[in-house]
Image: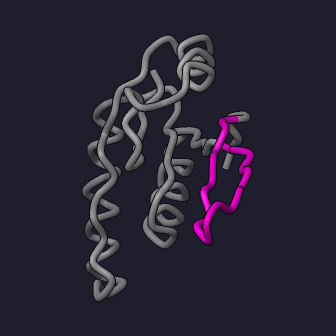
Amino acid sequence: MLLNLTNHPSSNWSSEQTDLAVEKFAQIIDLPFPSIPPDYSSQELDTLVEKFADRVLTLSPTVVHIMGEMTFTFRLVNLLKANGIPCIASTTSRSTEEKDGIKLSKFVFVQFRDY
């Protein structure tokens, strides 16, 4: 099972991303990424990381797809990997076009990549 720990629910993924996730991991379960207050101390962040690590370990996923606030992600990925749970990120290609002074970016899923 792929545990999707991001701000992007799998119900909004492209068919390419969903199909690959199901092909590789059979099932996708979403766990919303937490809101990380910018004024959190390192200790407060570590407490939140521990809480999420416990939740993830209880779910026993095959892999965790994790993307979000960098310091939280870094700490949680390290903790999960130390507990034998692989972590991945999704990669995308981006095309940008400018129209009437407004930049529009389109992201297209390419692959999952290991942390």
In this picture, is 104 found above or below 8? below
Front one among 47 and 84: 47
| Picture coordinates of residue 68, whole percent (x, y) | 46, 59
In percent of the image, x 34 and y 52: which residue is there? 33
Task: Please count the marks in the image.
Answer: 0
Residue 16 placement, left or right of 79? right
Q: Position of residue 11 (x, y in %)?
A: 37, 26
Image coordinates for residue 99, horizontal then vertical, percent? 64, 60
**Image quadrant assignment for residue 19:** top right
Left or right: where 33 falls relative to 69: left
Report the quarter where the N terminus lies. top left
Residue at 52 percent across and 32 percent down: it is 63
As drawn, 5 above or below 58: below
- 92 to 77, vertically: above or below: above
Quarter holding residue 97: bottom right
Residue in the image at 30% along x and 82% along y: 43
The residue drawn where x is 42% and y is 37% is 4
Q: Give the range drawn in magenta.
A: 91-109
Classified by dominant secondary structure, the portion drawn in magenta counts as strand
* Closer to us: 82 or 114: 114
Asked if residue 90 lies in the magenta stretch, the reply is: no
